[in-house]
Amino acid sequence: MRLTRCGMWMVVAVLLMSATASADFLVYHLGGKSGGGGRRRSGGPPGGMGMASGMPGAPAGGPPGMGGMPGAPNPGASGAPDKRIILQGKCAVESAQTVSYEHPTFKEKLYFSTDDVTIYKAKTLKDEYKAKLNKAAKDPDQMMQAAVFALKKGMLKDFYETVDKVLKVNPDHEAAKRVKELRKRIDENLPDNPETEKRLRSVVKRSGMEIKKSKHYILLHDTPDKPEKGHTKNRADERLELLEKVYESFLQFFFSQDIELNIPEERMMVVLFHSEKDFLDYATSVNPSLKSALGFWSRLNNVAVFYDRGTSEEFEELNEALKATKKRAEEVKKDARRNGAGGGGGGQPGGPGMGGGATQAADYIRLAKTLELLVNVEKENADITTVSHECVHQLAGNTGLLPRHVEIPTWVHEGLATYFEAPGDATWSGIGAVNDLRLTWYKALEDDRVHSNVKFIATNQVFDFARSHGGIVHGYGQAWALTHFLMETRIDKFVAYYRTLGDMPASTPLNPDLLYEIFSSVFGDDQKTLDQDWRAYMRALQTDMQRQAPEILEDKDLEPSRGPRRR
C-alpha cells in the first residue's frame, strides 16, 4: 500500500486551512486590505513582488474545484486573484501599528502591520470538547462520546481524563474499563527480539543505517542525529513519537467503541530514509511501480518505508523561491537604509512617518518570514501525512482488522489510511479530521454519478479502472469520502464488513461481483438509499475552520478599520 504524489502548490494551499486547538485566525492580505483607509498596493507588495509559482497564493496549477478553497487564489469581482494567507495561532495587538502572531507548534513570532491583517476569534477544539462534556452532565455514555471526540481530535490527555470521570460515575462502564486496561498494555515496552532487527536489516541491505527503538516500533534510519532548526528532537525521534501517538490512538479508537483488535506482540518494523533519492532507489528496486510513491507498506515483509519529505524536488523548488524572496527583501532593506529610512528591523513594521522605502522593505521582510514559516510547516505536514498513512496500513494488517494474508480491496485499505492521515499546523490532527485535499478530489467527481457512487467504489472499480495518476488520486478522494461516512455513521457495520473481508481464504481472487455480494451482505441491497445518505453527509461535512470561523470563508470585503479588525 502506498501514498502517491500530487502537485506541491495544492498541498501548500491546503496547509493554510489547517485548524488546531488555537483560538485565533489571522488573515494576512498580501498588498494590504482593500477599501477604507488601509494601504492598498496594486498588484501586491511594491517593486513588482508578485508570488513565485508554487508558493502560497500563487495563481497556478490547482486541481478542479481548487479555486473555492481558502488560502488558494480566488478571483474577486475584478477577476484578480484574492491573495490572502490564513494562519491559525496566537495573535496579539502590540501597538496601534503592529500585530504579532505565534505559530502553535513552532512557537515562532511574526509581526504584521495592522493595515495588512484581519483577526478572527473562534471557538477552539477544546471549547467544543468541553461543551460536549458539559452537555453530557452525569450520563456516562454521553461522557464517553465526549471522550471519543477528544481522542479523535488528538487530545489524548483529555480523553483519558474523561474516561476516569466516566468510571467515577459508573465503575462498571465496559467501554471505559476497556480503555483503562488497554492503556496499561500500551504503556509497557514490548520485549526486545534480536531476530526482529536481523529481519529488518535483511530487508534494507544498506550500510550506515542505524537502529532506534520505541515501545512498539523498531526504526532503521540514516537521518541526522542533530535536530533541525526550530526542533528539539531529531527526525528519527520525532517520527517514532508520531508513530507511537498514532498507534495508541488507533487502538483506543476501536476499543473505546466496543471493537476489540489484536495487540501486536513484537515491535513493528519501519524504515526512514533521509533523502528522496535513496528512498526511490530502494522503492523501485522492490517494485518499479513505486516510482511515484511517497511511502509504502509491504504486506509481504511487514515493513513500512518513508523518507524526509523536505529533501524532495518539490521542496527544493519552494526553497529556491523562498531564497529569492529573502534576497529581494534584503536588497530593498539596504536600499531603504541608503536612502535614510528605517527598515522595520526584526520584521516588525516601522513607526509613524515611515517612508515609502522603509514600508516596502518591511513588506518584503514580513512576507519572506511568513513564507518561510509556511514552507517549514508544510515540510512537517507532508511527513506527518505519509508516516501516519503508512502506519495505519501496517496497524490494520497487524491487529487483525485487515489481515495481511488476505487480499483486501484497494479502496478499503486506502480509505482507512486516509481517514487517519490528516495533518494540521505541523502536528497530527487526529482521527477522521476533514482532509481538505481529499475533500477537494472527492468534490471534483461528486456530480459524476458513473464514477462517484457507492457500488463503483465498493466493487473497487474506482481503482481498477484508473488509468492515470490523476485517476488514482480521484480514487483516493472517493475512498476517503465513503470511509469517512461509514466510520462516522455506521462503524459497527463497517467493521463487520472488514471482518467479512478478513475471513476470506487467502487465495480468493477479487472481482466486482464477489465484492458487491460481500458489501451487500453487510449493508443491504438498497444501495440507492445508502448512496443518497452518503451524498447528503458529504454535503454537510465541514472542516474545522468552517465550524470554528465560518466568517473567514464568507467575508469577501474584509473592510479595514482602525487597527486590526476582530470578528
Image (cartoon, grey):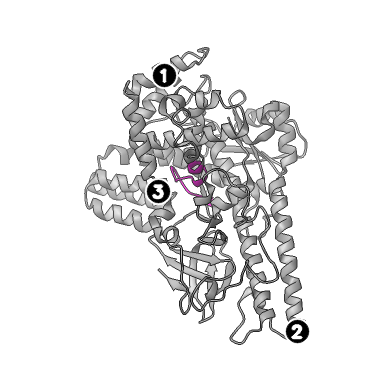
Determine the residue positioned at 74% across, 38% down.
Answer: 278
Callout 2 crowding tier (Cα within 10 Å): few <14, some 14–19, many ≥20: few
Which residue is more in the foreground, 251 or 296? Answer: 296
Residue 331 in the image, given as x and y percentages of width and height: 76, 72
For label 3, the SS is loop
For label 2, the SS is loop
Residue interval drawn in magenta: 427-440
Determine the residue positioned at 45% across, 37% down.
Answer: 446
Report the amino acid beneath label 1.
Tyr
Q: Quadrant of the C terminus?
A: bottom left
Residue 291 in the image, given as x and y percentages of width and height: 69, 32
Which residue is more in the foreground, 226 or 465? Answer: 465
Q: Which one is closest to the eye, mark 2 or mark 1?
A: 2
N-terminal label among 3 and 2? 2
Q: Which residue is mark 1?
A: 516
Quadrant hosting residue 271:
top right
Report the amino acid beneath label 3.
Gln
Q: In the picture provided, is 353 more to the left or to the right than 489?
A: right
